[in-house]
Amino acid sequence: MEKTKRLPRAAAIHDISGFGKCSLTVALPILSACGVEAACIPTAVLSTHTGGIKGYTFRDLTEDMRAFWQHWRNLDIPFDALYSGYLGSVEQTEIIGEMFDAFRKDVPLILVDPAMADNGKFYAMFDERMAKGQAALCAKADVIVPNLTEAAFMTGQEYKAGPYTEGYLRDMCRRLCDLGAKKVVLTGAHYRENEVGACCYDGETGSFDTYVTPRIAGSYHGTGDVYASVLLAALVNGFTLPESIRCAADFVYECLERTLKQGTDSRYGVDFERGLPRLGMKMMSLEDRT
Ligand code: PXL
């Protein structure tokens, strides 16, 4: 029998928040629905995420992480992408940095979402030290996906709320590339009050592009993780960076529309589940192109 090509394979390195639809509980289903085989390294296990919910449990998995990726390395498992997000400790930035170095020559895409802050504030438990650690990790990445708060904190600037000028966004992207990242997707980028979106910048070619959708009122938890996971899936499936920022923004917008209609608590995350079948079809559509 003729062999067919294996699925693209990505390793997602995030926490498991048992409730609240973010990090691994969105990354894994999104990758799977997009035809990407998902492996994972959990960075911490929590009962819920830390965004506006009190009393969560937190188990840090720093101690396990090096052995995790070293086992994979010993097994010679090929990966098409490594994708890091919310981390349980600053020390984990070093452990994942070592992992990136160990896999670098064999992995075509390393994507870092330095998930640690939003709206001008660090998440609970994080401070400047995490900004330094995540900046060091971003230096090893092909694509980074910070929001404007994380971008400001990693480049040592004051956070500025939007809307933004193109000059401000371009300057921020350049500063992020100066950290060492090859390409930047800056989420939360927008030019008018009633829109929200992202811009992308290629440090090598200098090409810059922005894509926005209408802004939906309220701040729903986990949208950054949904965005970054779709972006990664699109890139792994062969979409260009400008195409991928569109895929991710359209998907998040549709999730928000559904969630708004349902009137659920914004801390409980968005209805991404019902968008997965269509997203999967969109991802597979490129197979006809090649
Ligand atoms: O969505 C980012 C995120 C992931 N994981 C945990 C969080 C947050 C944001 O607050 O608390 C545990």
Image (cartoon, rainbow, N blue to C red):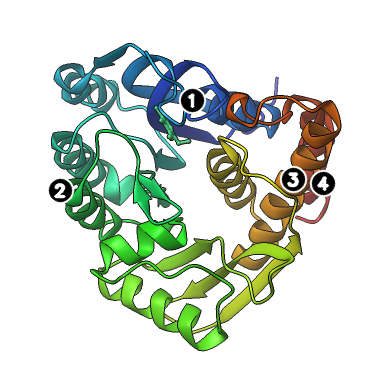
Which residue is labeled 3 in the image?
251
Name the N-terminal-most of marks 1 and 4. 1
Residue beneath label 2, please?
129
Residue carrying label 4:
285
Q: Nearer the viewer, residue 280 or 253?
A: 253
How many C-alpha atoms fall within 10 Å of the one at disc 4: few (<14), some, or many (≥20)? few
- Taking the spot 25% from the left edge, 51% from the top edge, the residue there is 137
Does 16 sit above or below residue 187? above
Residue 24 marker: 1
- Residue 124 locus on image (x, y percent): 31, 34
Q: CA distance from mark 3 to mark 1?
A: 18 Å
Q: Identity of the amino acid at label 3?
A: Phe
The numbered mark, 2 or 1, whose residue comes first in the sequence reads 1
Looking at the rendered structure, the secondary structure element under dot 3 is helix
> Which numbered disc, 4 or 3, marks the residue that appears first in the sequence?
3
Task: Say whether disc 3 or disc 1 marks the residue closer to the N-terminus.
Answer: 1
Q: Quadrant of ligand 1?
A: top left
Q: Give residue 60's position: percent from left, percent from top.
A: 23, 18
| Residue 107 visible | no
Q: Which is closer to the viewer, label 4 or label 2?
A: 2
> Where is the C terminus found, in terms of image quarters?
bottom right
CA distance separating discs 4 and 3: 16 Å
Disc 3 and disc 2 in contact, CB within 8 angstroms = no
Asked whether disc 3 touches disc 1, contact meaning CB atoms under 8 Å apart, the reply is no
